[in-house]
């Protein structure tokens, strides 16, 4: 049969029923790394959704034509959706955001840098999918 249990003074059974096993330091570090990765992915998904909404507003606000950042800011008085989409952005911030998004597909939309002029970069948004899916 089995060996008889030996009682050791001061010892406790860490695997006793009702008492959870304490995770190791390595498993805690690994779990934190997984949670940080999941958080980073969730944040990126939110940024992508915000960026897709911006591109959709720019596409509609520019009626599919090429535009500069200056053109966009000139049109905000005429387009409430466009105004709301860029409300917290300066022209410089919008230009940097468009540069960051250049050639990335977001919800069927891709912004492309067409050329550079004395008035700034000229942009165009290509529609090649279902731009209504994210928003």
Image: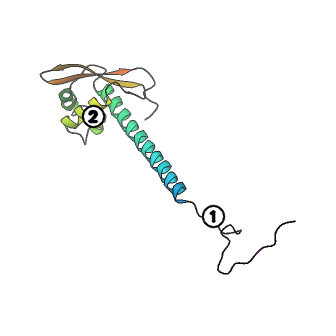
Q: Residue at x 42, y 45 (%)?
A: 40
Q: Position of residue 110 (x, y in %)?
A: 36, 24
Report the front residue among 22 and 6: 6
Q: Position of residue 36 (x, y in %)?
A: 45, 49
In the picture, the quarter occupied by the C terminus is top left
Which residue matches tag 1? 21
In the image, is residue 21 above or below residue 59? below
Q: Position of residue 114 (x, y in %)?
A: 25, 18
User: Secondary structure under badge 1?
Assistant: loop
Determine the image quadrant of residue 16: bottom right
Q: Position of residue 107 (x, y in %)?
A: 43, 29
Determine the image quadrant of residue 88: top left
Q: Residues within 10 Å of mark 1 (few under 14, many from 20)?
A: few
Please say if the residues under marks 2 and 1 sit with CB atoms less than 8 Å apart: no
> Which stretch is magenta?
1-9
Magenta residues, dominant SS class: loop
How far separated are the C-alphas under marks 2 and 1? 48 Å
Say left or right for 36 vs 92: right
Say left or right for 55 vs 96: right
Which residue matches tag 2? 97
Determine the image quadrant of residue 120: top left
Report the front residue among 28 and 131: 28
């Amino acid at each position: 049969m089995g060996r008889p249990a030996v009682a050791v003074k001061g010892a406790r059974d860490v695997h006793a029923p009702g008492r959870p096993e304490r995770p190791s330091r390595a498993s805690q570090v690994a779990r934190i790394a997984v949670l940080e990765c999941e958080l980073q992915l969730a944040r990126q998904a939110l940024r992508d959704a915000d960026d897709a909404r911006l591109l959709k507003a720019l596409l509609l606000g520019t009626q599919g034509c090429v535009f500069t950042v200056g053109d966009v800011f000139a049109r905000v008085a005429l387009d409430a959706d466009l105004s709301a989409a860029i409300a917290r952005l300066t022209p410089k911030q919008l230009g940097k955001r468009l540069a960051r998004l250049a050639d990335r597909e977001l919800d069927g939309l891709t912004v492309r840098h067409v050329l550079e002029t004395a008035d700034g970069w000229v942009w165009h948004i290509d529609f090649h999918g279902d731009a209504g899916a994210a928003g």
